[in-house]
Amino acid sequence: AAGGGSAAAGGGGGDTITVGFSQVGAESGWRAANTKSIQDTLTEENGFQLSFSDAQQKQENQIQALRSYIAQGVDVIAFSPVVETGWDAVLEEAKAAEIPVVLTDRAVDTADESLYVSFIGSDFVLEGERAGTWVSETLGTEPINVVELQGTTGSAPANDRKSGFESAIADNPNVTVVASQTGNFTRSEGRTVMEGFLQSQDDIDVVYAHNDDMGLGAIEAIEAAGLVPGEDIKIVTIDAVKDGMQALADGKISYIVECNPLLGPDLAEIIKSVVAGEEVEKRIVVEDQEFDQEAAIEALPTREY
Ligand code: GYE
């Protein structure tokens, strides 16, 4: 039946779709916006009953959550896999139970693509390439040393943003990545790792951070060392969440490649189609923008996240 806001009181209507969603964690501003988008969209009003769990960035917690959704017999499982590998066993259990799985935001590395019905999310390799292209073309006209703050080790966005960046700078001998370490996508680890870089490296020109939060942590470390972010050391990040955009508007970050976290509406559509037995696209790529200071100042007043 078509929606129209006349759901019977008492709940449990036959049309309600039960969804189990296992989220990575609450590591970043991006993740907070992503969680909100999912929770705001998969509502009872829209015909869903959502079980949501936070894995605190641990694969074992996610596997446990997926197993409990399988045991509950939800209609659809959706999840954002913290790392790329190691999912085949639990995804085979879901398949055996005939519960379709939608990958949201991050990909899994598997030889068997029948283990999920669809994957919605950004192209992380392209994001890394865009960041690398900007660094190469804008800053790499003279020799520069880059330090890299990687995302969570083994995660799709860390793997892809690293390789995309590397391929974009490969043909420019002026650009050298002198150190690269994980900051686990958090502000506090970004700060700690940057403090270490500032001690071990005597000439840092650019920070490439795989997300805004680690870039914001790097700003703290740079300022604590008595240097000026945006002048002494330029920072390039990925995500374009509000705090990152503010730092870009303020000139502390120099460039941001967007990664759109508002995946809830697409996810809701896919889930409805899957339950209706319709064909769905195996890969839905989310479109992203790029921002310099001027664009950030313009976008900030109406920025949703
Ligand atoms: O860029 C980062 C978050 O998987 C795209 O995870 C996501 C990334 C995002 O922690 O901020």
Image (spheres, helix red, strand yellow):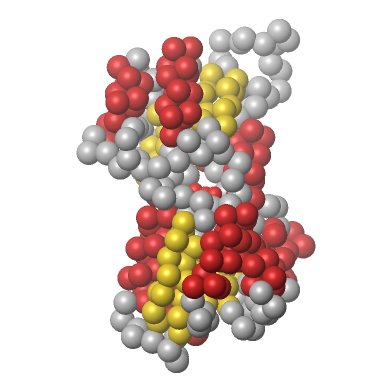
Task: Look at the image and tell me whether residue 238 can be seen.
Answer: no
101 or 178: nearer the viewer = 178
Reply above or below: 284 against 213.
above
In percent of width and height, residue 36 lies at 66, 39
Q: Which residue is farthest bottom? A: 142
| Residue sitting at x 70%, y 60% | 243
Q: Which residue is farthest right? A: 301
Q: Which residue is farthest left? A: 111
| Residue sitting at x 37%, y 65% | 164
In percent of width and height, residue 87 lies at 33, 32
In percent of width and height, residue 160 lies at 38, 57
| Residue sitting at x 33%, y 70% | 167
88 or 130: nearer the viewer = 88
Q: Quadrant of residue 165?
A: bottom left
Task: Look at the image and tell me whether residue 297 can be seen.
Answer: yes
How many numbered discs sit on the rendered protein? 0
Q: Quadrant of the N terminus?
A: top right
| Residue sitting at x 49%, y 63% | 149
Reply above or below: 23 against 254.
above
Reply above or below: 292 against 47.
below
Reply above or below: 262 against 201.
above
In percent of width and height, residue 126 lies at 41, 63
